[in-house]
Amino acid sequence: MDLGKTNSFNLFISKHGVKLLYFLFALLILVEGFTFSKIVPFGQTPDEIAHYEMIEEEFGTSGYVDEMTYVLWYMAGYGGLPRSEQTGVNTVAAEAVSGIKFTQSLSITDFKPNIRILRHLPAGLGFYAGIALGLPMASCARLAEILTVLFFVVMSLLTVWVAPVKKEVFALTMLLPTYLQQCTSINYDSVLLPCCLFLFAYILKLYYSEDKVRWGNMALILALSLVILVTKPPYILILISMFIIPLDHYELKIGSKFELAGFVKKYIWFFVAAGVAMVAMLFYIGRNNPDIKTIMSDIFSPLDFLRLLKRTFFEYFLAHIRQVVGVFGWLDSGVSVACVVIVLLFMVYVIVFKAEKTDLKLNVKRRLILLLSSFGVFMLIEIALQSWTYLHLGFGRDVGVAVYKQYMREIPHIMGIQGRYWLPCVPITLIALSGNKERKYKWLYFAIQFVFYVGLFIYVTALLYERYWAA
């Protein structure tokens, strides 16, 4: 072997390896995004029809989803696919209704949007653009998916570009089969997940950058936070990760003399006390809210709450982990246990070392902050679903905290948990646990990633084709 050529190759990979990985990721995300959108049929992600109804409510229109549900869900036979593993797409029935259009026209004056429009904005724009163009119902649904995929692709590329370290961790999360399905179909995860990952990547960028954090940076964070709050509030706790950024790194000037971050630092204990008092006040004001009462019962009966968590995860933990990696449709098909194990091992491989050179490192305190952020999101999701479980089982809501404690002892487990709810926690947790030692043989590292993602894509595509189209 020519040593000179080998050294030149290693030098090229050392200098351009991250750019090469970024290019390959862009290629993969584009191909896989549109493939998932096409291979997963209409209505085959959880509550997809309900999300179309939400789009109609958010945009302020009516009548279109009822028509589309009758034609595509019932006449085309897509409604017979969920939880029916032996049933594939009826291509004859789907083709027979493929040219049917909506009976009502669309005018700009028909729209009466509200703030929740943010939850499904790409899909809604595509859906109504198709209606305005006079396209058939199936084409309108397809156009909604196309704009959803484009939003996913753009946000994914921006996230990997913005992330200052561990770009491969973000790439890994965004190429998980469950993440791909959710971001290429009609649901608010297709907006929520990209915004959550971009927000965390941007916070990391502000920490690692030598530039000060100014109002422009805060405005972008606030905009992303608004989208998250409107969609699924528990994920707002990603903002806890902002505490890794030292106050000295902020420059938030008001006028020519006053600087907000310096003022906060000077009176930090006052602001901490004010924050605690504000949280206590919010709990008091909302003391009759069922979710607040659920939280209070968990706080006042921590052992009962821990037992409830044990009952929930002792039985379903492995199923939830499988859902993080790849469970499809209406939770009626998914990757094998062997695939889950391989993906988990690959996660470990990705985080053990780092590929980039950085002088600034995450110390133990900042790693704990990231873990707290991830754990906070996780716990708020569980508590929200705990409250939903009481509602689902018909338990009285207008009762005291003492009765909520009894509810907690009576229910067998928290219902409605799906592993995909934890996807925004994946990059936060992995980066908090990642190593600081620089990786050798980067060319091999990037090559293994590419082979892994291509292999996973081929396996999952074959799985979905067999599920929906092979019959």
Image: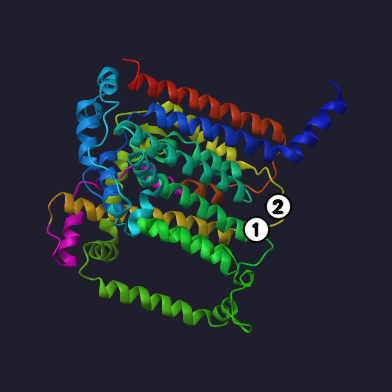
Q: Quadrant of residue 149?
A: top left
- At x 56% / y 49%, what residue is drawn? 431
419 in the magenta segment = yes
Determine the residue located farthest toward the bottom in the rendered image: 257
Mark sitting earlier along the chain (2/1): 1
Left or right relative to 175: residue 469 = left
- Across and down, in percent, residue 241 comes to 51, 60
Task: Give the residue pinned by disc 2.
Answer: 358
10 Å neighbourhood of mark 1: few (<14), some, or many (≥20)? some
Mark drawn on residue 208: 1
Range covered by the magenta-colored residues: 396-425
Q: Are marks 2 and 1 in contact (CB under 8 Å)?
A: yes
Residue 245 or residue 93, whichever sits in front: 93
Mark drawn on residue 280: none
Residue 43 or residue 93, whichever sits in front: 93
Q: Quadrant of residue 118?
A: bottom left
Secondary structure at badge 2 equals loop
Q: What amino acid does circle 2 point to?
A: Thr
- Across and down, in percent, residue 334 comes to 36, 29
